[in-house]
Amino acid sequence: MGIIEVKDLSYTYPHSTKPALTNINLTIQPGEFLLLTGPSGCGKTTFCRALNGLVPKFYNGEMTGKVEVNGLNTIEHPTMKLAQNVGLIFQNPDNQIFALTVEKDIAFGLENQGVSKAEMMREIDWALTVTGIQHLRQRATHELSGGQKQRLTIASVLAMHPKVIVMDEPTAFLDPVGAEHIFAVLDRLNKEFGMTIILIEHRMDLAAKYVDRIIVFNEGSLLSDGLPTDIFVSDSTRLLGVGIPRVLELARRLETRGLRFNQLPVSADQFYDSILRYLPEPTQEKSCNVIDLDMYTGEFHHQPVIQVNNLHFSYPGNVKALNDVSLTIHKGDFIAIMGENGAGKTTLVKHFNGLLKPDSGSVFVDGVDVSTTSVAKLARNVGLVFQNPDDQLFEETVEKEISFALRNFGFRDSVIENRVNWALNLLELTEYRERSPFTLSGGERKRVALASVLAWDPEVLVLDEPTVGQDYGQKERLRHFLVHLRTQGKTVVIVTHDVEFVAECQPRIMLMANSKLIDEGTAKEIMTCPEKLRQCSVAQPEITRLFSRLVPHGLPPDVLDVDEAFDLLLRHVKEAEQ
Amino acid sequence: MSLLDSLRFTRGDTSVHNLDPRVKFMLTMVFFAASVMFLDLVPLMIVFVVQVPLVIIAKVTGEWIKSLKGAAVIACIIFVSNMLSFYYFQGGNLTWALVEYSLSLTFRFIVLVTSFSIFFLTTSPDKLSLALEKARIPYEFNFAFITAIRFVPVLADEAQTIMDAQRSRGLELDKGNFITRVKNYIPILLPLIINSIRRSLELAEAMESRAFGATVDRTNLYELKMNQTDYLTLTFILLCVALLIYAKLYLPSFPKLLGDAAIF
């Protein structure tokens, strides 16, 4: 008898014709760490809601089959009672923090259950310790950083001592180091306290090494279920476009060339242990075949489009957000701005189209001083796409949404029509032309937001966190799209936490921490400086982490993507054999 | 806005912060009553002299001065409009008594601002809600009150982001005539409203998941307990009330500081 038993579960949301879940059968044993994945809209979130009875009781709709949690049928028991067995943690921490101070928020669930004060104090202490946020106990919740908020939501659910913790993409908004902290907390809860953990996540490179079982959903049904390595090598998963850890992908490709791995690796460390026997003994001297860096700087003789000089900026209340930032972005550059939450990345890009004006220092776009030019004028050259499409979509149809900016900029009707068609086509949205943007899925809404900016064909395109909440297929599509823009000579700036995405695109990187620009360089230069990355709460991509361990064996450290890693390793192993 | 900003709770661990919210509320009410009962400079100054040490003990001097700065414009309006209206009313006689009267009115306003500053700057909404709970206000109202306070900064951030996103798409808020300007706010209000609806659903889900309403005998992490300082303060308050009543009934009038000679 598992802690969670799901039998023939089917469910359809009200006002929907298509079922969100079809015929799910699943048993989860106590103490499992389970990862739930699948393309956007596959029913993962709906499934989680079914685990504590929100589906169908909160959402209504039609449910058949049965869900039992710790022997309790979710239909027969109210959600507030089930909450003691299943703790659900949602994606956006802001929408699940109720109190004004940390300890009071942790107490919220306990207060609701009528727990005595003495016991509450004990539970709060415990929850704070396990999640590592004792020092925040008395802090105001709105002052916390994104990572701290997410750890608070775990602590708050934990205090109720649920048997199962269910988390829906808990790290989507976090910087890589913040994300690692969250996974470490979950890992500890699982290993030390034997809690059952169900995690929804798209980023396999981060999560795969912690879990012992993976379940893949597709279009509302359960597609596959098994050990991580089995799932990742199965053809059905690959065809679905579920992201596969890069190191595992690398190992698979090496296996086709005759190398043997005892067990397919899901982390850099596991890979290292297996590949060791193929490599020559480590030598003391470090090998020096770092790729000649001049090759990369050669292309930057273009004109500067954005010039930032000694920029200082503070928000009201003397909150320093940018401290003496200077940088140059040239025409045709592809730049990723990375760094910890709250480092000032978004504040910086808001200067590029004049949304914010420098306190001191200057920002020039195409030679125009932003402090004396209106946003409407600057925006013609610099298109800024915000992280959350819901912060800008408001029109009745996708077509109107895309033409909104064009009308603001005073384009002629015939031009507007052409541009809208062009943008719809470019982002594969033509079939949604007459649909309301609000009826589209998250990924589609994100594309509409992008199209609505792209439509006026700005010279510089700035994307704030374009990969957040996107599944592997959507990210691939975005990557191809960015490559396409670059071939047209557009300047592209992305603000991102997604190191694996950066490793594949290999843009120039600007690293930020503490309101300052810490370093700037090619992806290869930056990703091989672990100390600087740490300082900015950015982690190395798994492949780079692997190669930094392989340096003593005569391999170069600056390897970011699977293709290059494959070629180098294969050649190296062959040489060692001879 | 600075006037409202200065009423925002400032965290602290001083004896003023730790005062029982009910006692502190009574104290505020005494200040309030005193400044409404008397319209002479002398008693108002006495109240003010009592208030200032409280501000200093609570270490909110900076915020208090900010609130006074915010109130300065209104204070000036009160002073000037009084001077003008009474000047014409009394047939163009500009006397020191008139100056003193207008000053008292202005000073009354400052004393009122100060008493509310002390209360709101040093009383956490959590404690306020506890006081409400003790006053038998149903928990649902309390919860709504706390949630509203909790989401003020969140919504303000969101409104700013939406505004930024739409301005990035070429929306010019202050362009055109009055009607166009109102229309310009539609692209800002619609996402804000829709996001709020979405947010409220998510909040409800999260509340359910945290056992909201599981029992009617809800407990509370924080409790209100009167300690020695509270009782001392309470005694002081009662003395003040007695003094106020005595002064109002038996003291005929306060000396005029400026006399009543004509200025010209």
Image (tube, coloured by chain):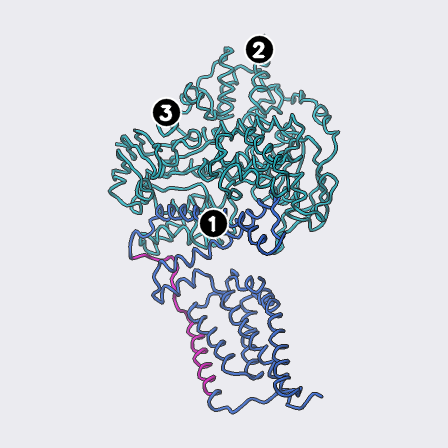
Chain colours: A cyan, B blue
User: What predominant SS class does the magenta segment belong to?
Assistant: helix
What segment is highlighted magenta in the picture?
B217-246
Neighbour class for label 2 at 10 Å: few (<14), some, many (≥20)? few
**Residue that label 2 marks:** A574
In this rendering, the answer to whether B219 lies above or below A566 is below
For marks 2 and 1, give the CA distance: 63 Å
Instruction: Name the chain letter of the residue that bears numbered label 2.
Output: A
- Residue drawn where x is 47% and y is 49% of the image: B193
Label 3 is placed on what type of residue? Leu
Q: CA distance from mark 3 to mark 2?
A: 39 Å
Residue A492 x, y percent position in the rendering: 63, 33
The x, y position of residue A477, in whole percent, is: 53, 27
The residue indicated by pointer 3 is: A223
Note whether residue A532 is visible.
no
Density class for disc 1 (Cα within 10 Å; few <14, some 14-19, many ≥20) is few
* Chain holding disc 1: B
Give above or below for A533 relative to B97.
above
- Secondary element type, mark 1: helix
A409 displayed left or right of A246: right
Instruction: Tell us which disc is closer to us: 3 or 1.
Output: 1
- Mark 3 on the same chain as mark 2: yes
Residue B62 seen: yes
> x and y percent of residue A481 in the render?
58, 28
Q: Give whichever of discs 3 and 2 has the lower sequence position.
A: 3
Instruction: Give the quarter of the figure containing the N terminus of chain A.
Output: top left
Foreground residue, B144 or A86? B144
Residue that numbered label 1 is attached to: B193
